[in-house]
Amino acid sequence: MKTVVVAGGTGYIGKPLIETLCAAGFDVKAVARPQSLEKVPPGCAAIVGNVLDSRTYQEDIPAGSTFVHLVGVPRPAPWKAAQFRSIDLVSLEQSVEAAKRAGVAHFVYVGVAHPAPVMRSFIAARMACEEIIRTSGLNATILRPWYVLGPDHYWPYVLVPVYKVFEAMPRTRASAVRLGLVTRSQMVATLFHVVGSRVIGVRVLETADIRNLGSKLH
């Protein structure tokens, strides 16, 4: 039985991912603060700890496991730059440290599509996270969605016709696809596939890859 450790497992993507993994028979553990233990999905064991301090949980990460990092500031916005540095970046640094110490087999991270003309502070923090992963020596998969549609995240559907126009134009096609929309179900399906796969080195999945894999596997 493959062991999967999830940091950020009670969030928007983490919770349905854990539910999917547990239903498929994976041994899943979620890093959670004491006040968040009731949010951990049934069937998932809790590792009590603070994602901003790997010393509080690193001894409980099994060697050879897959570590999925999903911690991040909810509903990113330009005015949250300080939080991107203090939460997104710091939590990733701590997860990588814990993963290296434990000797995990595969590190999975959800970053963000780039380059882009907006959300520069958010993208900068996520790119810094990617660099930390690349220099860590861990075998890793990095996913780069732009916006994930789902419950309470539906408003960008109004932009779908605009995306279609830009995707049809040769000059804007690449950017429109890179910064395209994916659904939460596509993200969960892609992450499920990634967790079950083996990777050597660092692999990157862009928006188009998430759409293709997610649609085929969902």
Image (spheres, rainbow, N blue to C red):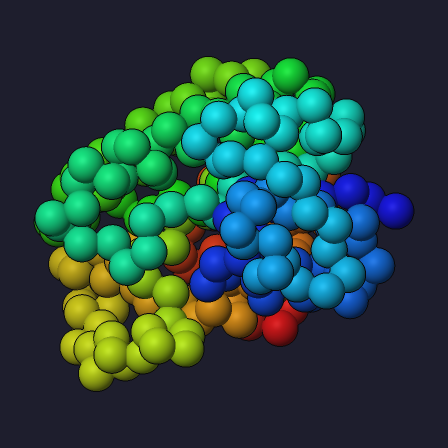
| Residue 94 visible somewhere in the drawing | yes
Q: Where is residue 201 in the image (x, y as percent from the top left)?
A: 59, 26
Q: Residue at x 24, y 75 (%)?
A: 156
**Left or right of residue 168: residue 44:** right
**Left or right of residue 47: residue 190:** left
| Residue 139 visible somewhere in the drawing | no
Q: Where is residue 69 in the image (x, y as percent from the top left)?
A: 52, 41
Q: Residue at x 65, y 33 (%)?
A: 106
Which quadrant of the structure image shows residue 10? bottom right
The residue furthest right is 1
Image quadrant where one finds the C terminus = bottom right
Q: Is residue 99 above or below residue 47?
A: above
Q: Which residue is drawn at 57% across and 46% down?
A: 34
Q: Position of residue 2 (x, y in %)?
A: 82, 44
Instruction: Tell which of 142 and 77 is nearer to you.
Output: 77
**Left or right of residue 98: residue 175:** left
Q: Position of residue 124 (x, y in %)?
A: 23, 34
Q: In this view, does 94 lie above or below 197?
A: above
